[in-house]
Image (cartoon, coloured by chain):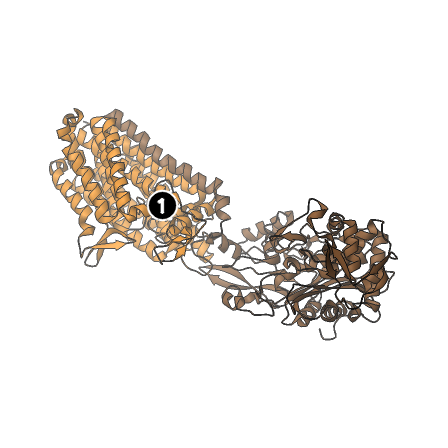
Amino acid sequence: MTARNRELAGLVVAALIACVALASVTIARDAEVAVSSMTWGAMFLGLYVVAHVVVRRTVPYADGALLPLTAVLTAFGLASIYRLDPGDGGRQAVWVAAGVAVLAGALIWLRHDYRVLESYRYVFGVTAVALLLLPSVPGLGQRVNGVRLWVDIGPLQFQPGELAKIFLIVFLAGYLREKREVLAQGRLKDFGPLFAIWGAAMIVIVQTNDLGSALLNFGIFLAMLYVATGRALFVAAGLALFVGGAALLYNGLQHVQDRVTIWLHPWTDERVYCALNGELELRQDCASYQLVKSLYSIANGGFGGTGLGEGTFASTDGTQLIPYLRTDFIYSAIAQELGLVGAAALLLVYMLFVVRGMRVALQAQDGFSKLAAAGLTFGFALQTFIIVGGVLRVVPLTGITLPFVSYGGTSIVANFLLLAGLLLISNRANTPR
Amino acid sequence: MNRQIARLTYVALALVGVLVVMTTYWQTWAAAGLADRQDNAIRRVAEFSIDRGLIFSFEPRKRLARNIEREVDGRTLFFRRYPYGRLAEHVVGYSTVGRSRTGLERSLNDYLTASNANLSTLVDKALDELRGRPVQGNDIVTNLDLDAQAVALEELGTTCGSVVALDPRTGEVQVMASSPGFDPNLVEESFQRISRITADCTPAAPLLNRGSAGLYVPGSTFKVITASAALESKKYTPDSSFVDPGYCTVYGKRVNNFDTSRPFGTIDLTNALVSSVNSVFCNIGLKLGAKRILDTARRFGFYERPPLETPADERLPSGLYRNGRLYYPRIDSDVDAGRMAFGQERMLVTPLQMAMVAGAIGFGGKLMEPQVVDRIVAPGGRVIEKARPVLIRLAVSQSTADSVAEMMRLAVERGTGTAAQIPGYSVGGKTGTGETGVPGSNTTWFIAFAGADEESPPELAIAVVLQNQSGTGGTTAAPIARAVMQAILQGTENP
């Protein structure tokens, strides 16, 4: 059985999962089996079959597991978002379709040799930094929850950070491929770019208050630096610099301090000053409200979960318990309704995606491809870790999206680009010659 | 580069692995702790999704607590309404979203929400869940006599105080009234209105169940215990003779009778109780010592929370209190036994405890466990728990109890408690006037038992306490006790 046929079989399984999930949501809501959930499932399958056909024509030797795994992740996301808000579910479906279109476009455009991108590496690097700083441009940027993540361009809203991540990886892959021997010698003067990027990461934090994306991009940089040079010392030094810088910022920036305080002590027994309303409140009723409510949501799932459509996301008077439930906190919704079984299954899908992605990196024959595949895959894993880890109180909570699952167009499209990259690299590595 | 990529793979997998471990942690080990937290709104929604069991009075059978349904975010929630809100609010309590629960609503929450570990409840609940129906809780039938309860509250009026009445033979609590009260229907949305309630005392404390958590100076009602201790010691008999000069000397200081102008002269123990002569009991106290009297008090249930189905922190133990804490003397000289013997000296008691004392005296010394719940009924109507009388202990010997009971009967016949006489019934009682030191703010008491005749065990024991009184127990509390006893014994004309 060829990779392409395995892929098709996998997509059918993913469509079945989507069908069952959507059906159980409608059953829980309307107490009847609606034909519409079958229709949705069929449309879902149709969409991915289109993607499959494009993959078959453009990158026939690409890894056969990546696309079905993506389909399963988007199925998780679509079902959860549809359950929380059918309207948003429909919009998310449109975004997934857009993501597939972008995937198809990228595959068709770069089907012959994606390595042309390497020669534009500096364009990518500059664009990445520009995109990262875009939200802090007056008039464009929009503050949400104290963090500048969004950019308004006319009626469109998008999160440039998601695209910047991909661009940065392309830049780093090209740059490190070129400079890896020099860097490996460890001469101080070659570390200029390293310091430049470290500085840029810090500037991004200061400018946008966006700890999550700074941590993500810097983590990707260190991982790719390690892959390129094989010097663990660099990673240690980079981490030390980041921690040192973050510690300095901790004392200087109230926002960073708040995040850490919430992380370490989400519950208080005594009332503390609440910046939201200026009164004395228990911290769980004020600053750490989101985190605590989300932990309650996860805990309520228990081993088996409440069942799709049966979870509790509103209080007894009908008010929404967790803000940003469809984006940052989608994991706590999934963990409540699907329980440990479902949440662990979701994480397992992420693990499988990571394994396949890294396999692509191992199979790739040139340095640029190896670095790009490793960077894309590690970025994917680290982003998952930062947001789910934040929700689970493993690390301070910072708002970034859960790849392929969270509601949001930019995120979906960016992650389909990431998938396109891995498929292209995989295809080239496996092409018989 | 492949070695580095392999290592990076392990790091990436470890990162996601940590997420699996932590998800497991929150959903298994930590889940129970999180579910119990006060601010966990999800848990609250789950609780209010249950068709909570109803709470009934015994006679006449009325729904003291019922549910109203409301659709919230696609699910049916059940909220409490209390049709007889101001009649039994302290015992029944309330169940709210914002202010949690009190009373039986709190202590019997497991039964009311069908989360008790009873096999048939588990089966019913599982069936409800399978059918997708709201889980139905178990109903509770209390022993409360709603008419007598209404009489008690009417008699209390705006006076701060409490009436507790129980059947001494079984311990069934038929009346537990506390004034001022509150409307439990207002707790959720207009709590301010409850805290603004005024009464003839400050603080008004309308939420306090004075019946089991109100601590009062017992005054002369404590003489029942001193008399019991005296007889139990075998040093005294009902006929033991004393000389009353109108006062008693403690540590060289005079402790006066209630009315010092008319000393009783030579008097026996029976008449000393009938006329409530302080000096006699003061001298008995000095002779017996504080610890011996307290030991007898203990046998009546002092120094432990009286057992009842209401939450433990809504019941307080009776005994000596020092600095707000229950205190038991190590040696006799720690306490002024003379004053204690007639119910002063930092002795504080609850009406429930004093009703138990009166009941045990009337019932031949047998102290029965008070019970306010008669039975718990599953949704299908099957009784899953039925209260049975439980003997706590023989507080005093039968002969002691009978002797003291006789003294109490005489006190109602011709002593301080004549206002509690009920034609056709044998009533024994003891008045009490606890002095707080401020004129016009005495705590007055009446404790009593009543039965058809002297031979048969009494059907009823009662304790009435009133705050801030200028009169005596005999003039203020005894008439209320009589009214409530009549309501229970004879039934009321206008149900």
Q: Which residue lies furthest to the bottom in this view?
A: B494
Q: Compared to A71, does B96 lie above or below?
A: below
Q: Position of residue A398 (x, y in %)?
A: 31, 46
Q: Position of residue A66 (x, y in %)?
A: 29, 37
Note whether residue B220 is visible: yes
Q: Position of residue A324 (x, y in %)?
A: 34, 52
Q: Compared to B17, does B154 lie above or below?
A: below
Q: The orange chain is which one?
A: A
Note whether residue A415 is visible: no
Q: The brown chain is which one?
A: B
Q: Compared to B247, does B395 lie above or below?
A: above
Q: How crowded is mark 1: few (under 14 residues within 10 Å), some or many (20 or more)?
A: some
- The quarter of the rendered structure image containing the N terminus of chain B is top left
Image quadrant where residue B242 sits: bottom right
Residue at image position (24%, 52%) is: A150
In this rendering, would A149 be left or right of B347?
left
Q: Where is residue B291 in the image (x, y as percent from the top left)?
A: 74, 47
Residue under label 1? A261
Dot 1: element: helix
- The quarter of the rendered structure image containing the C terminus of chain B is bottom right
